[in-house]
Amino acid sequence: MTDLTLNEKTKYATRRAAEIEAEKHFFDAAQPFYPLGFSVGYRNPGHWDIYARQVPGKVSAWLHANPGSSTSGKDGERERAFRIRGEPGNVVVMDERWNPHKPHPRESPLPFRSVMAAMLWIAEELMQEPTA
């Protein structure tokens, strides 16, 4: 139970709905998007994180839905795009890229037999280049 009034709850719901629509607008306007690079971080066996530039628009959407507000965030900053977890024979990849059309939690993780196979798939996803 919260101590918010009905007016406060509906004001928040209206602002959040505007932010969701703005996120979709800015995300779509940035397509096609190519991060043009990524980095891999290793923590321990079976625990890898892949970072890449985020599709521009998340911060712009927040600013649009919250006029007069400010943030230190910038569109297109780096985000953890993928998580690799598991052990040989049982490796999974979780897609964590920002996409307002596919909010979290997403569909089940993608299974792979090895970290190498998972990295090949991730590289194929992230290493696309503009054709023009």
Image (cartoon, rainbow, N blue to C red):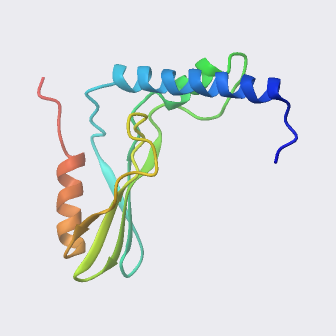
Residue in the image at 21% along x and 54% along y: 123
Image mark count = 0
33 or 38, which is in the foreground?
33
* Residue 71 image point, x, y percent: 67, 31
Give above or below for 29 relative to 16.
above
Residue in the image at 48% along x and 26% along y: 23
Left or right: residue 103 versus residue 30 is right
Quick one: which residue is furthest to the left in this view? 131
Left or right: residue 35 versus residue 80 is left
96 or 43, which is in the foreground?
96
* Residue 48 image point, x, y percent: 37, 69
Q: Quadrant of residue 36?
A: top left
Q: Quadrant of residue 128?
A: top left
Q: Quadrant of the C terminus?
A: top left
Residue in the image at 65% along x and 22% along y: 14
* Residue 13 image point, x, y percent: 66, 27
61 or 131, which is in the foreground?
61
Left or right: residue 88 versus residue 15 is left
Give above or below for 40 relative to 33.
below
Give above or below for 120 relative to 103.
below
* Residue 110 image point, x, y percent: 27, 62
